[in-house]
Every structure is written in structure tokens, then in C-alpha cells.
Image: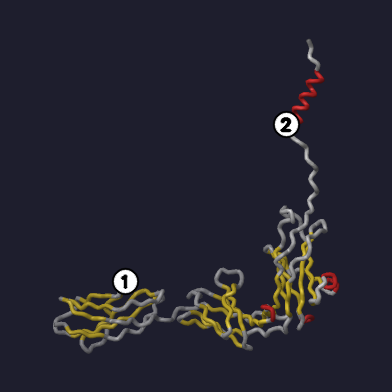
Amino acid sequence: MIRPFFPALVAAAALGTGACGHVGDPMPPRANLPSRINDLAAVQRGSTIIAQFAVPTRTTEGIPITTALRFELHAGPSIDPFDREKWLAQTTEFPPRNVQGGYARYEIPAAAWAGKEILLAARAIGANGKDAGWSNFATVNVAPPPEPPQLEKPVATAKGVRVTWTGPPGDFRVWRQGPGESGFARMADVQDESWIDTTAEFGKRYVWEVQRIVKLAGGKEAESEPSNQQDLTPKDEFPPAAPTGLLVTLAPGSVEITWQPNTEPDLAGYRLYRAVGTGPFERIAEISGIPSYSDHAVEAGRTYRYAVSAIDQSGNESDRSAAVGVTMP
């Protein structure tokens, strides 16, 4: 008997349908909205307001953004009570100064808002013209531009490089660019008109600049323009301290000399001097390890006087210690 073909085809189709599973509802189209900016920050620097935020790299759905974005940043006086539409109506839009390194940076003239509090907000707009809304608001209390300090030539000292400046008193921020660095790093906030850079290394060139900082209400601050720049390659011309605790004792056929170790980090060793009787001191040994020495070149009945100095890795020699004498029996 010939089996009918059609029922078999239906069965095969039913089996195939069961293997594929239930067909779900169609997925809604992606919104493709750039993520909302949430790290907008702004500060007054001299007569300019510097604003910056990280460029969104993903959409609100977590999809990487592959098309160019457009940015809007608005700045305008604060209003009370706050109304976004009224605020937007009196703001000015500013283009970015540059967009690089994952950040958009703005430089906005501040003179028109001197003495006022201003609000800034930004948004990222996708290639489809859509956005996820305005960013957080950044507030700036615009002050008269702080006068920048005048930086003097840095001076190398035994403790580090002393950086000094002149100008109105106040708070200051010190910046430094080291060898091989492309920009300036924030080093210290001080209230004095000088600061010692204890991390600068001898033989390396550094560049410093300083800003004056004006504290404002609400924990805000205004920065002056950076001062003039000054550079220095500090040289180690500073000897270690003279050794202390020199002790001389007699031993059979020798004089044993010890002293307290120096603690300078660049210490290289010691230099031992000896005088016979009332004669002049002469160098008798270079010592790089333990602060001690055995003098076997001695004779009975003679008086010997000893003194020791310290040497650093740059060859600077300290003053000699206090002399100590002994007479061989």
C-alpha cells in the first residue's frame, strides 16, 4: 500500500515547528540616545570659566556609540525659584574649546557675570538628533579675576627646591612639570608665599607655576591665571652633616676608631683623618661600610689624633668631626 505523502509532510512541518519554539513579539526599535552627561564641572580661572565633562561612549541602552555626537552647553544667571525653561531663555550657548582624550572642554568669558552666580548645563545629541536630557548643573560664583602671583627663580636647598612668589596674600596652588611629563601636576595648596619641593631630584629639570586661589561661598573657589613659569635643574652642592660620637680606643698593636652612622639617604661613605702629635691632619682611609676603622700603622709612645668626615654620592664632603686623641703605650 502506498502511504499518502501529504500527511507525512504535515507531520514533518509540525516537528520542525516544535524544534524552533514559540515565536515571540517583535523587539521595539532602539532609542539610540547618548547617555546623559552627569559629571559636568566648572571653575573660574582668571577672567575665564573652564567647564568640562566626559564624552558619553554608550547609549542609554548600553550600546557603544559609533557616530559623532553634537554637544550643547548653556550658561546663564541663576534664578530663584528655579525654572528650567525660564533659565534656558536667558542663557547663552557656547561651543567646545576642544574635544579630546574623552573630554569636552569649554573656555567661557566670565566678565559679563562678575558678581553673579551662574548655572551651566550640557547635553549630548546623537546623529539622529535625539538626546537623553540635560546634565547635572554646575554652579560658579563669578568673582573679580584674582591677580596671578609672580614666580621668582627657584633655589636648590639641602631639603629640596624652594619655590617663592610675590603678589597679594591668600591661598595658592603649586603646579610642577617634571622630566618626560606632558603636563603640569598639582603639587600643593599653601597659604605661605613659598614652598619647598622635597620630591625634586638632583640633576633633573623641573618647571613650576603657581595660581592664586580665592575661596568663595558654598565651598567654591576662583583660580587666577597661572603665574609665569620658572625652571631649574637642581645640583647637589650640599654636604652631609659632620659625623658625631667619635670614639677612639686602644688595642694590642692598633687603635680602634668608631663613630655614629650618618642618616642621609645619599650617603656614600666616610673619610678618616689622622694627625701625629701636633702635626697636620692627613687622610688615611676611605670607608664605605660600617663606621669603624682599625689603625695598625701606629707606634708605641706616639700620640695620634683622629677626625672623620662624611661623603655623599655627589662627592660633597662634610666638615670633620671633633678630633679625639690617644697615646700608644
Q: Quadrant of the N terminus?
A: top right
Name the element at disc 1. loop
Residue 178 in percent (x, y) is at: 55, 72
Q: Which residue is mark 2?
A: 19
Mark 1 vs 2: CB contact within 8 A: no
Q: Which residue is mark 1?
A: 289
Q: Earlier in the sequence, mark 1 or mark 2?
A: 2
**Residue 102 image-quadrant placement:** bottom right
Residue located 58% across and 84% down the image: 191
Residue 327 in percent (x, y) is at: 17, 84
Asked if 14 appears above or below 306 in the picture, the reply is: above
50 vs 317, left or right, is right
Check disc 2 and give the amino acid type: Ala
Check disc 1 and give the amino acid type: Gly
Residue 40 in percent (x, y) is at: 71, 68
| Front-most of residues 309 and 199 | 199
| Front-most of residues 162 and 142 | 142
Examine the rendering and report whether any part of residue 275 can be seen. Answer: no
Q: Quadrant of the C terminus?
A: bottom left
| Front-most of residues 186 and 182 | 186
**Residue at the far front in the pictured view:** 81
Q: How many marks?
A: 2
Name the element at disc 2. helix
Q: How far apart are the two marked residues, 1 and 2, measured between alpha carbons?
A: 83 Å
Q: Residues within 10 Å of mark 2 (few under 14, many from 20)?
A: few
**Residue 154 image-quadrant placement:** bottom right
| Residue 234 - label | none
**Residue 47 image-quadrant placement:** bottom right
Residue located 80% across and 73% down the image: 82
Residue 243 in percent (x, y) is at: 33, 81
Q: Residues within 10 Å of mark 1 (few under 14, many from 20)?
A: few
